[in-house]
Amino acid sequence: MNENGNQALDLAQLMARIREDAEKRKSNSPVDASAILTDLLKTEGRFATSISSSATSLGASSFPALALESEFEAREHYQLEDLLVLNDEAFVRNAYRAILKREPDDSGFAKYLENLRDGRRSKVDILTSLRFSPEGRLRDVKVSRLDRPLLFKKLYNVPVLGYLIERLVGIIRLPALITDHRRLEAHLTARYEHLAAQINVRDASFFSRLDESDANLSERLVKAIAELSELYKKVADLHHQQLKALIREQHEINEDRNRLKADISAQLDAIQDQFKRQAAAQESQAAELHELSTKMDTSLQKSRMELVLQERRLSLLLEEARKRLPQPFEPDQMQILSTEKDHLLDSLYCSLEDQFRGTREDIKEKARSYLPMLRDASITTDIVDIGCGRGEWLEVLKEAGLAARGIDISRVMIEDCQRRGLPAAAGEAITYLRSQADNSLSAITAFHFVEHLPLETLISFLDEIARTLKPGGVVILETPNPENILVGACNFYLDPTHKNPIPSQTMQFLLESRGLCRVEVLKSYPMTSAILKGDDEVAKFVNHYFFGPMDYGILGRKV
Amino acid sequence: MYDVLRRQGNNARLFSETRSLGNYEIFDVSGIKRFLKGADDVLIYHYSVGWSPILSLLRELKCRKAIKYHNVTPAKFFMGFSSSDQRLCEDGRAQLGHLAQSQCDLYLADSTFNKNELVAEGASDARSFVVPPFHHIDRLATITADEAVLKKYSDGTANILTVGRVTPNKGHLALIEGFASYYYNCNRNSRLIIVGKGGEGFSPYSKLLHLAVCSVGLKDAVVFSGGVSDEALKAYYLVADAFVMASEHEGFCVPLVEAMSMKLPITAFASTAIPETLGDAGLAWPERDPFLIAESIDLILRENSVKTALGLRGRQRYEAMFTNQIIESSFLRALSCLQ
């Protein structure tokens, strides 16, 4: 920068710019230092109208400074007491003013005040020191009785003698010291009272000012409260608006959430429906499958039955064919022969029955165990008992309210039955069944019958049963159980009309092979009297083979 | 002044009641009468506060008499702060008329502002001369600046400096307000350094200033150095970025000249003798508006060209008007009127 730069600086322009900036700043300054400082001055008791304006009002306290000492009066001549009556700072300051005719300088003031306070120098010492300093001598202010202490002071400085004089003067001055002390005491008391009075005056003034300002204050307070309440209202309004906005927002969020929830649950429902549909479809498919398999079973059974019937027809055809061959007897003769031959042993058989079969009541009791099988198949009518004998079973059926009829080849037995009022007729089993229509009987029973038949007849018998039973009908056969060694080896042969013992497995096979199904073997009537006690192999073996059931029943069903 | 008089071959002596003054020998005022016996002898009375013996001295002494008027601070500034200062100033102001009318041979005023006061109070215009106060700028130029101060304040923070005794007429509250405005509105990285005796916080005024600084939240941004050595003072001038003078009453204002000599850009309130001393070497504001001070500082620190230009102007003004040589010649010129 040089002379040119200097010339380039236009102070007026610069100041105009600054002035403009300052005006702008005033309107948007973040900190109002002026207000803060004005407040400070007020609280400090300095009632300044403005910081920046003239400081004339600065520090212009409305009260004069609290003064404990009376104001100093400038004179050309003083009594020592005039100066001694003051204390502390006032004493030092006024000593300067009186003797040196000026305000104390800082260092001198501090030095003398310190000496005075710690008792190193007395007031008289200080006055002497000031008065007889070069400046004091120049001022030459008259202070009566101040020369005496100086004289004494000089005397005290004389070795030995000085000490004695000091002591002596001390003793002589004792009454004066006491007086001084009293004076000081009185002075202090007066000062305290003065102080109290000043405080009281200030208090009174203060409170009266307070009263004055009270009105002002309350007016300002009312205004401030009004402003505050206005502000509060604004804040409350704002708060209310914000709250409303918040609630609206929350509401929208809730709606969104609900919409989303509905969407999700709809989708879930759709998925569940789909699952249900699929499950139903699978179920119906399974049902169809089951139905199909049942149908297949039925048609299989039907086919089997058809086969049996075909076989029967074939055998009838064969028999017919044989009849066509040259024959030794007339057919009528043959019939009579055969029929009568059958009855030859009727009475014998009755006697045998009586001998070995057991009491009527025993037989009935054993027979009752087959009733549930008929009930399970819901059979109440069309029951035929083949080989009904003395009609124990017929009687059980009649007692149970089921409609049945008996067939027996023995006329003696039939008579017995008829005497008892049981529906029984004499007849040969196969012939009788052949006379029955297809699917006409609900149940066919035969107790101790099949063991009397040769195999071929037995097959024919089973075939007729299969033909005549209604679908759902049952056949119940009972025969001695050869698995019991006693039965198989001995008891079976007690009846000489018995042909062969038939083991339950054989019987089951025969039934099934002739088209009956769901064949069940029912081991009945175990020998309870002679059973071996114990759980060992021998007991098991003996109990099974010697004391096992003496008869077994077999149940077959027609599909 | 003493040195100048001695250099001129005079037997000069300094008399004072209390003051000690550097390495100079001070005689007690009681010796004045003995020292000034001849009619050609000269008494130069430095007048700034009340001192009652002067009036009788002036009456009694037969020598030639000169009054060096530094101006008397109006007592109102001290009201409530210092009753002793208040009394000194009241007494001083009260003596102005007497002194002005005491038919002294010479009236030496620090400034035209002071001279006008004297003349207004009855001093002879013909015997009144403006002689700026001698200063120690030459000494400042030769000494080494205090390194601790230099180091402490060369930290990148903008330093705003004011120098002068911390007394109630110096307008510190307005200065603090102005600085607060600058600090909060323009630059938080700045500090105000108040160099001067009495700023230590012991006097009621100083206590008030400390309180004011705290209440505007600038405790850490305003530094009261208190009285400092010349070395430290030089260091403060060196680290300063701008110089501010907010005083309400100055008879001349030596710190302005010091700042000008140090090429510091200056802004001030144009009160009393300040505009006269500052001239066009700084931004002097007629209205006491702290915002103007704040914005002036801002402009000075923002625009380097302004800062440099103002600094240069200050230095030029110092060299043109206020070097000790120039003051000496004014002084000697005025003294020559005694012949």
Image: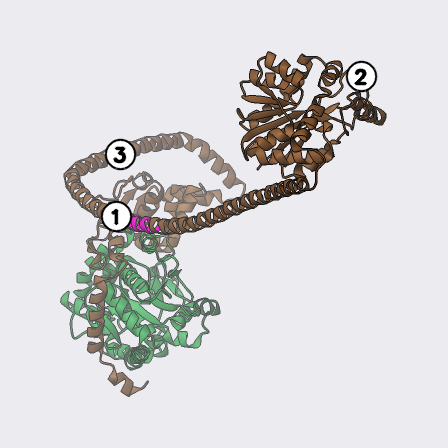
Chain colours: A brown, B green
Q: Residues within 10 Å of mark 2 (few under 14, many from 20)?
A: few
Q: Tell me the crowding category of disc 1: few under 14, some 14 to 19, or many 20 or more residues within 10 angstroms, Cα based.
A: few
Q: Which residues are magenta?
A: A239-257
Q: Nearer the viewer, residue B22 or A349?
A: A349
Above-or-below relation of A190 to B316: above
Q: Which residue is the extreme one toward the right?
A: A538
Q: Is residue A277 above or below residue B168?
A: above
| Residue under numbered circle 1 | A244
From this viewpoint, is residue A257 visible?
yes
Label 2 or label 1, whichever lies nearer to me, is 2
Q: Which residue has dot 2 on it?
A: A530
Residue type at tag 1:
Lys
Which chain is indicated by disc 2? A
Residue at image coords 35%, 49%: A262
Three-letter code for the amino acid on which mark 2 is drawn: Ala
- Residue A194 tag number: 3
